[in-house]
Image (cartoon, rainbow, N blue to C red):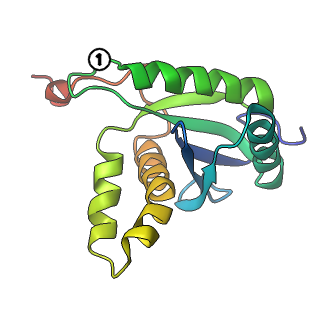
């Protein structure tokens, strides 16, 4: 591990899925997020090899894993699976992991792709990495911090 965790290097946004994982990365200055890859899960060993190589080759300093939560901010079963994946990711790469609210990222990605002249297969091939990019962009826009858990949507303006 040549990149010091969380000090220098890029961020990687993860749109967690049990079959496919969308990956987005920032530029070295951490100002822009770009879609990187849709990783098709294979096995624990192959998955670990993929994420270790990603961390090294792209100089990833920290992973930001999308946390799927209900509209009221409560966590779901998928939230727990994402948290378990985040812990696994931290263990196999040695990089810190932060969780960030991913409400609406997939539907926003679907809307963006729906307007493109793509086949259904082409849209599906881009969906997860675009959702990861949208989530990582929101993370950057929030100042890269955010609270430890997402707030309910009706609390956004203190109501």
Residue 58 % position (x, y): 76, 54
Q: Residue furthest bottom?
A: 117
Instruction: Report the residue at 51% width, 27% height from top.
Output: 82
Instruction: Report the residue at 48% width, 55% height from top.
Output: 133
Q: Quarter of the image holding residue 142?
A: top left
Can residue 94 be spotted in the picture?
no
- Quarter placement of the C terminus: top left
Crowd class of label 1 (few under 14; some 14 to 19; many from 20; radius 10 Å): few
Depicted 155 relative to depicted 17: above or below = above
Residue 107 % position (x, y): 28, 51
Query: Could you tell whether 69 is left or right of 11 in the image?
Result: left
The residue nearer to you, when weighing 1 against 114, is 114
Can residue 108 be spotted in the picture?
yes
The residue nearer to you, when weighing 150 against 50, is 50
Residue 8 % position (x, y): 75, 44
Query: Could you tell whether 20 is left or right of 151 in the image?
Result: right
Depicted 79 relative to depicted 138: above or below = above
Residue 152 % position (x, y): 22, 23
Depicted 3 relative to depicted 119: above or below = above
Of helix, strand and loop, which one carries label 1?
loop
The count of marks equals: 1
Query: Could you tell whether 109 is left or right of 133 in the image?
Result: left
The residue nearer to you, when weighing 157 against 62, is 62
- Quarter placement of the N terminus: top right
Instruction: Report the residue at 62% width, 50% height from top.
Output: 40
Instruction: Report the residue at 61% width, 27% height from top.
Output: 86
State the residue position of label 1.
74
Q: Residue furthest right?
A: 2
């Amino acid at each position: 591990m040549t990149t010091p965790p969380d000090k220098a290097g890029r961020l990687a946004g993860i749109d967690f899925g049990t079959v496919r994982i969308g990956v987005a990365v920032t530029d070295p200055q951490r100002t822009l997020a770009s879609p990187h890859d849709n990783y098709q899960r294979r096995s624990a060993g192959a998955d670990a090899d993929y994420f270790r190589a990603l961390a090294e080759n792209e100089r990833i300093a920290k992973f930001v894993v999308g946390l799927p939560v209900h509209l009221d901010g409560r966590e779901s079963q998928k939230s727990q699976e994402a948290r378990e994946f985040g812990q696994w990711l931290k263990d196999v790469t040695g990089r810190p992991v932060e969780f960030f609210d991913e409400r609406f990222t997939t539907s926003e990605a679907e809307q963006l792709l729906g307007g493109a002249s793509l086949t259904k297969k082409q849209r599906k091939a881009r969906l997860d990495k675009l959702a990861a990019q949208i989530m990582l962009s929101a993370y950057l826009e929030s100042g890269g911090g955010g609270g430890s858990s997402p707030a309910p949507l009706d609390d956004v303006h203190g109501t």
